[in-house]
Image (cartoon, rainbow, N blue to C red):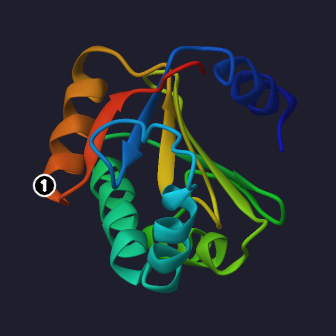
Amino acid sequence: MHRDISERVEALFEKEAYLIDIFPKTVPRKDDDRYFVVEKYLQRSRAGFESALARIVIKLYCYYDMSVVTQDTELEAPAPEQLIAVIENGYSKASGFVNILLPECDTLLAFSGGDLYMTVYNASGDVKELISQLARAEGLFFYRAPGI
């Protein structure tokens, strides 16, 4: 990966974060840890969630240039087929990650294979509104990440 892209990605992890999530807000901790039981169930049926995130990214690709970084791949301006393959491969690896940089607006989308959310860093203005609309259209929620 080009050094400047790597540095931009690392710097964006320090910026304000939002979540694209299956829940409308952070689930509070309960003594019976019910969230983890529900999460385990949802992990077994995550294909719809993965497809929704992929559709959000692909739709954003129509508006913004992207660079993609994973543990195995580094792509600048990937073709649509490459982008789709990288996203799908990221889901298949529970310990894998996918970072998608939108250089035009200095925004980063990040997800790990085992997560049921995507984190969006440094989104503001038009890109923030577009991501919010796309998440809502996929039946997902977009909100400021607590404590990140």
Q: Residue at x 56, y 74 (%)?
A: 40
Q: Residue at x 79, y 66 (%)?
A: 95
45 lies left or right of 32: left
* Res 74 → quadrant: bottom right
* Res 148 → quadrant: top right
39 lies left or right of 73: left
Q: Position of residue 131 (x, y in %)?
A: 27, 38
Instruction: Find numbered disc 1 in the image and state the secondary structure of the residue it sits on.
Output: helix
Q: Nearer the viewer, residue 100 or 30?
A: 30
Q: Residue at x 37, y 40 (%)?
A: 64
Quadrant for the N terminus, please. top right
Please count the marks in the image: 1
Q: Position of residue 130 (x, y in %)?
A: 21, 35
45 lies left or right of 16: left
Q: Is residue 98 above or below residue 104?
A: below
Q: Nearer the viewer, residue 80 or 48?
A: 48
Query: Label 1, on which residue?
Result: 137
Q: Position of residue 139 (x, y in %)?
A: 18, 58
Q: Is residue 81 above or below residue 29?
A: below
Q: Residue at x 71, y 57 (%)?
A: 97
Q: Position of residue 3 (x, y in %)?
A: 86, 30
Inspect the image, locate mark 1, and give the three-letter code of the amino acid beneath it. Answer: Ala
Instruction: Tell me if mark 1 has few (under 14), some (14-19) or many (20+) residues whose alpha carbon lies within 10 angstroms of its own.
Output: few
